[in-house]
Image (tube, rainbow, N blue to C red):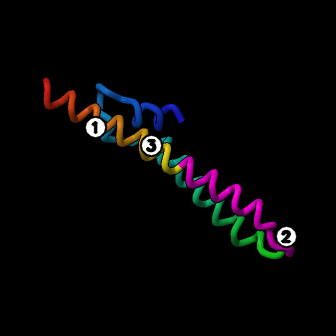
Amino acid sequence: MQEYYAFIDDEGGNGGRKLGFFAWLYCCLAVVETAVVVKFGKGMFPKSWPSHVLWFWGVVGSTFTVVMLVWVLRIRWAQLRKAKTA
């Protein structure tokens, strides 16, 4: 995942405009793995999840998404301000 980190954090070089081959490969493998689990995992857990577990993971996922969005936007705004002053 070094290529993804370089894509997010790169201030020079390619300027964070190009995601590397292995990062794309990792993303594709994650999608395929998720599809396999969804397709063949039906019926493995017949009971539904308790509502407190669903709420917990929903809050964790939402918080993570918001934090990552704010983090990326702050980096992009800093790059834009730096480019305007240079």
Residue 20 sits above or below residue 66 on the image: above
Which callout, 3 or 2, points at the residue further toward the start of the chain? 3
Quadrant position of residue 14: top left
Quadrant position of residue 54: bottom right
Instruction: Identify the secondary structure beneath mark 3.
Output: helix
Q: CA distance from mark 1 to mark 3?
A: 27 Å
Q: Residues within 10 Å of mark 1 (few under 14, many from 20)?
A: few
Amino acid type, residue under disc 3 in the picture: Phe
Q: Which residue is mark 3?
A: 21
Identify the residue shown where x is 70% and y is 72%: 39
Residue 45's tag is: 2
Horizontal arrangement in the rendering, residue 51 relative to residue 2 (left or right)? right
Q: Is residue 8 magenta?
A: no
Bounds of the magenta span?
Answer: 44-64
Of helix, strand and loop, which mostly describes the magenta segment? helix
Q: CA distance from mark 1 to mark 2?
A: 45 Å
Q: Residues within 10 Å of mark 3 (few under 14, many from 20)?
A: few
